Image: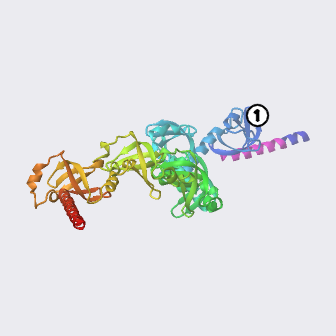
Amino acid sequence: MAEEKANFVENSDNTLLEEQYMKSLDAIEEGQLISGRVIQISTENVFIDIGYKSEGKVLLSEFKDPPQVGDSVDIVLIRKEGREGSIIVSKQKADEKIFWRDLRKAFNERTPVQGTISQSINGGYDVDLGFGIHAFLPLSKVDVMRVSEERTKEFLNNKSFFFIERMYSNGNINIVVSRRAWLESENKKRREEFFSSVSIGDEVTGLVKSFTSFGAFIDLGGFDGLLHINDMSWGHVTSPKEIVNLGDSLDLKVIRIDSEERRINLSLKHFTEDPWSTFEERYHLDDVVSGQVTKLTNFGAFIQLEEGVEGLAHISEFSWVKRVQHPQELLKIGDAVEVKILNYDITKGKVSLGLKQVQPNPWDDIESRFPVGMRIKRKVKTISNFGAFFELEEGIDGLLHLDDFSWTKRHKHPSELLKEDEEIEIMIIDVDQENRRVKLGLKQLEEDPWKSLQKAFSRGSVIEGVITGITDLGFFVKVQGEIVGLIIKRNLYDPNTEDLETVLAQYHEGDAIKAVVTEITPLKQRLSLSRKEYFKKTHREELARYIHDESTEETVSLGDLLKEKLSE
């Protein structure tokens, strides 16, 4: 009796509990999202307690990540009573409900959703958001930069975040998303964070994004900083591409931040000390130093003495003697050279260098190698209107002027006597070391016939020559040494005893003629003659002889008379 009573009480308690559960379960509708707790995990199923007499059962494969006992899991109640009295639940349905709930929330609150760009379609891309839901991504909303046709494939299978731009249903669900809007939002966040947290002198990392003539733009994570060409190296940089390449990842220093203008200046060179700050500790005026040719220009060569210290050797400082038209005649990029420091300006970061100064100057002892009066044989290098140039040695030329071709002949052009590459004997007649000029002479190889003539025939002496020309001026007469003098008309005749016409008719070209030297000036190569003075001189001499003869006769007769007188 007591046992029956106990059984009755137990059954009554179970019935009460079941009624209470059923009442609580009645408040949940089928298809409703509820939360349960994992109480057991088998090889295939996960058992979930939702507070009912039997547990809900979910396939383990429905979980993306394997759960742990005690985990809270969202599920959907499919049916309150199954065939065996158990409830039927679905995690997959719960995931779908949660997905849609989050999707609407993301649209309303403009928070990003994740998806995969699955394929290219007309005007843009198809984006797989999951659970069979797809969205349209217009081509203009793929990236912050314009997407060219060549870049369309690079976004395929790209997993990314998006903002939902539109979400509506007209029988089918239509969703339009924007990746560009999300990128711009992230870039803005990173930019704001950068300006609020980074200071001048801090180190940052970025990618070389693009080039300009004055530097390179560095992507710092969706926003750009400028690496100016002057901040790439302490040395001279002609093009940004000499230092960095597109896509390079660089560690850089922040050297300027303008929060208002949103500008960032970056530097590579500031990782090392400015070599100009200690320049004078290593270099001094007139030091001979080694360097490497880095660049050639029309006006000279840039030579690097060390990293960040580059000097210019002007083309005028290349050679003591050679006329260099372009540096490439003597140098090429990469050449190791020795140079002398001629000048420097630390504030401007400039060094003037000399190449020729490390070599002896051949003009310093030019007079000992080519003394005045030295006879040499050389080939004609070039011919000009006023003379001919001869190369005495490499880089040193001498000029044979037209005036020094002949003592007596006047050549109109050097080509009348010389031709290029012809070897002749010449004489050094003058060396101007200061102005770096050497004068050569051809006529000086022989004695000056004018000086010889002057020695032989002083003024007033008689000279004989041949008439080479009869002009309105008078007679041109060639005398010894091929020298030509002039007898002007008024000196052709004596108006007291002759007339001009008779004299002119008397002489012809080629006739021998005697005259008196009235002027001889070797420096001006001038010889003036006079036929009139010649006859005067002749008459005077004859008269003198006559007078001498007469006086001699008279003296003899008188002596004879005296003798005769005394003898008497």
State the residue at coordinates (57%, 57%): 341
Q: Is residue 70 visible?
A: yes
Q: Is residue 409 visible?
A: no
Q: What secondary structure prevails in the magenta region?
A: helix
State the residue at coordinates (25%, 53%): 463
Instruction: Tell me: 493 left or right of 148.
Output: left
Q: Position of residue 452 (x, y in %)?
A: 34, 53
Residue type at tag 1: Ser
User: In the rendered image, which quarter is residue 64 located in?
Assistant: top right
Instruction: Tell me: 505 left or right of 244.
Output: left
Dividing the image into 4 quarters, which one contains the C terminus?
bottom left
Taking the view exactly as shown, the residue that stands out farthest to the right is 2
Query: Is residue 397 in the magenta section?
Result: no
Per the image, the residue denoted by label 1 is 42
Per the rendered image, the range of residues in magenta is 9-28
Dividing the image into 4 quarters, which one contains the N terminus?
top right
Taking the view exactly as shown, the residue that stands out farthest to the front is 568
Q: Position of residue 306 (x, y in %)?
A: 61, 53
- Please name whichever residue, 276 or 331, is drawn nearer the observer in this view of the structure: 331
Q: Position of residue 14 (x, y in %)?
A: 79, 42
Which secondary structure, mark 1? loop
